[in-house]
């Protein structure tokens, strides 16, 4: 999925899922950066749903497109308050950066600062 978020104003983006969602439930749409591993909760509203697909509007906050958030994100769709996901996948976020520099440091996801490697040699006979 590719999502384009404009630099100015509040951005509403329509996304489509190829499965049926219930009109009576509320959902959490989360984006997790593959670079910094920070999770962003995106407000959403289910617009329509039928047997073939569901249409949801994502409401990106004002200034989101000006924060240099270009990149690849893992998205997760869950029922509100639940831990199990309904669907997950990859999303490419495209913004028009022009404001604050992207100064978030890289997080490898593991403590690699004091890692010491063991080296084993096999003797040549």
Image (cartoon, grey):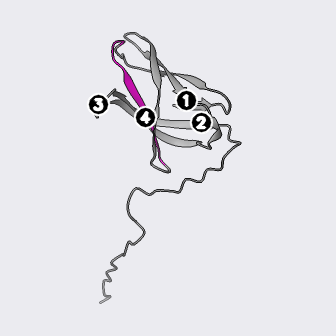
Query: Is the Cβ of the residue at disc 1 closer than 8 Å to that at disc 2?
Result: yes
In the displayed structure, 7 sits above or below 38; it is above
**Residue 5 image point, x, y percent:** 61, 31
Whole-angstrom CA distance, mark 4 to mark 1, is 11 Å
Query: Is the Cβ of the residue at disc 3 closer than 8 Å to that at disc 1?
Result: no
10 Å crowding of disc 1: few (<14), some (14-19), many (20+): some
10 Å crowding of disc 3: few (<14), some (14-19), many (20+): few
Residue receiving disc 1: 60
**Tag 4 or tag 2, which sits nearer the N-term?**
4
Quarter-of-image position of residue 110:
bottom left
**Residue 63 image point, x, y percent:** 62, 35
Query: Is the Cβ of the residue at disc 4 closer than 8 Å to that at disc 3?
Result: no
Whole-angstrom CA distance, mark 4 to mark 3, is 12 Å
**Tag 1 or tag 3, which sits nearer the N-term?**
1
Residue 25 is inside the magenta segment: yes
Residue drawn at the location 56% of the way across and 43% of the way down: 71
Q: Which mark is residue 82?
A: 3
Residue 82 is inside the magenta segment: no
Query: Is the Cβ of the residue at disc 2 closer than 8 Å to that at disc 4?
Result: no
Question: Which contiguous range is marked in magenta?
Answer: 23-34
Counting the numbered discs, the total is: 4
30 or 119, which lies in front? Answer: 30
Residue drawn at the location 65% of the way across and 50% of the way down: 101
Whole-angstrom CA distance, mark 3 to mark 2, is 26 Å
Query: Is the Cβ of the residue at disc 4 closer than 8 Å to that at disc 1?
Result: no
Q: Which mark is residue 64?
A: 2
Q: Which mark is residue 86?
A: none
Element at label 3: loop
Q: Nearer the viewer, mark 2 or mark 4?
A: 2
10 Å crowding of disc 4: few (<14), some (14-19), many (20+): some
**Residue 51 image point, x, y percent:** 37, 10
Outermost bottom residue: 125
């Amino acid at each position: 999925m590719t999502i384009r978020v404009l630099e100015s104003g509040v951005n509403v983006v329509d996304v489509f899922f190829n499965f049926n969602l219930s009109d009576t439930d509320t959902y959490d749409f989360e984006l997790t950066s593959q670079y910094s591993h920070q999770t962003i909760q995106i407000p959403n509203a289910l617009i329509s749903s039928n047997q073939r697909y569901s249409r949801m509007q994502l409401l990106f906050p004002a200034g989101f497109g000006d924060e240099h958030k270009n990149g690849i994100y893992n998205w997760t769709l869950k029922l509100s308050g639940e831990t199990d996901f309904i669907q997950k996948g990859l999303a490419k976020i495209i913004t028009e950066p022009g404001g604050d520099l992207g100064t978030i440091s890289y997080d490898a996801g593991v403590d690699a600062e004091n890692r010491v490697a063991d080296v084993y040699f096999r003797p040549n006979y």
